[in-house]
Image: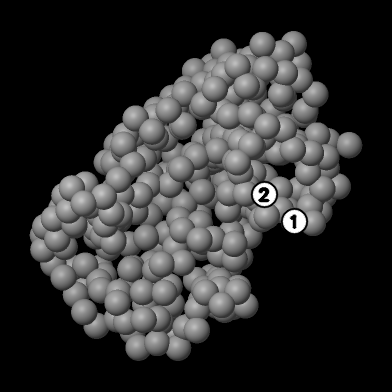
Amino acid sequence: MTKVLITGITGFVGSALARALAAEDVELFGLVRPSADRSRLDGVDVTWLEGDVSVRESLAGMFDWVDWVIHTAGMLGRAGVPESAYHQLHVNGTSNVLGEIEKLDNPPKVLYVSSPGVLGPISGPPADETAPHAPSNPYERSKAAAEMVAHIYARQGLPVVIARPEFVYGPGDWHVLGLFQAIQNGRFFTIDHGRATCHPTYINDAVDGMLRCLKEGQRGQVYHIGGPEPVTFRVLADTIATAVGATPPTRNLPRWLAMAGATALEIGGSLFKFTPPLSRDGVAFFSEDRCFSWQKAHQELSYTPHFDLETGVQKTVAWYRERGLLE
């Protein structure tokens, strides 16, 4: 039986990968901090191992008996988090994991879960994996640096593959719940009329693509895993509004005004110790183009996304409603 260890297993992506692998009858190991909430994996047979990717000593011996390692441990961008925290978790954590695995005579294959965000905003056609790193915020900079660590180990012979799933959403996700709630409650506004593009990827497609990277991807290669096509934020907001039974958003702010407001909120949050409802990184996300080509994964790994935006959003809304998170 194939033995798989997942870091970040209690997160949205990590737990979805674990559930998919459990259906394939593999033996699952989850590396978690003692305080981790393990409820996402209720009913899944997981052997829990306590450790912290940021603490090298806690990883000793963790990877000795497994065939595959999926390194998903990470933290999504949010206001108020110092850049050093992203660096510690993403860069040092990745170095610690790969450094321990490198010690082994027969190291397991490793999938490092990165992000297309390492390329920064994209102008022009969808970016492929040859585009240069151009990160634009602390989260992206830390992920780009972690990718460089992974490439160093891959060049030294470690079997590391890099997957870049983009804007993953779906049942089990809490990160974008606020967007759905804001649209339902009439609080969402577009920036520059929602003309910027994003590239939503439904969780089932993301998991399928990442597992293909793990099983069939080549050492040192990077693969974009994206939804069927990029959409504008106007289309995204209208699709969510239809699914939740709300009026499509009509309010709009120019980017400069939204950025000024976010700056003021961040300063206020720092002074008065609250998390600002809007950050400059958030304004950037909703006003910059980010679209990516998944053709390399299609050609080399036979990856094809199957969930269009309308279907994925409807399934996500149904999951939120079942838990009383949406009306």
Q: Give me the residue at 51% from left, 26% from top.
A: 54
The quadrant where residue 56 appears:
top right
Q: What amino acid does circle 2 point to? A: Arg
Which residue is label 1 attached to?
A: 42
Q: Nearer the viewer, residue 209 or 124?
A: 209
Tag 1 secondary structure = loop
Which residue is the extreme one toward the right? 1
Q: Whole-percent x and y of residue 185?
A: 36, 81
Q: CA distance from mark 1 to mark 2?
A: 7 Å
* Left or right position of 133 against 146: left
Q: What amino acid does circle 1 point to? A: Asp
Which residue is label 2 attached to?
A: 38
Q: Whole-percent x and y of residue 274?
A: 28, 54
Q: Nearer the viewer, residue 149 or 123?
A: 149
Tag 2 secondary structure = loop
Q: Whole-percent x and y of residue 39?
A: 68, 55
In the displayed structure, would residue 71 be above or below residue 120? above
Q: Is residue 158 visible?
A: no
Q: Give me the residue at 36% from left, 74% from top.
A: 182
Q: Is residue 11 visible?
A: yes
In the displayed structure, would residue 250 be above or below residue 73? below
Q: Are marks 1 and 2 in contact (CB under 8 Å)?
A: yes
* Residue neighbourhood size for the residue with mark 2, other residues' Cα within 10 Å, grouped as few (<14), some (14–19), many (≥20): some
> Number of marks in the image?
2
Q: Give me the residue at 21% from left, 79% from top.
A: 251
Q: Quadrant of the N terminus?
A: top right
Q: Nearer the viewer, residue 47 or 169?
A: 47
Q: Give me the residue at 46% from left, 67% from top.
A: 177
Q: Whole-percent x and y of residue 297?
A: 57, 46
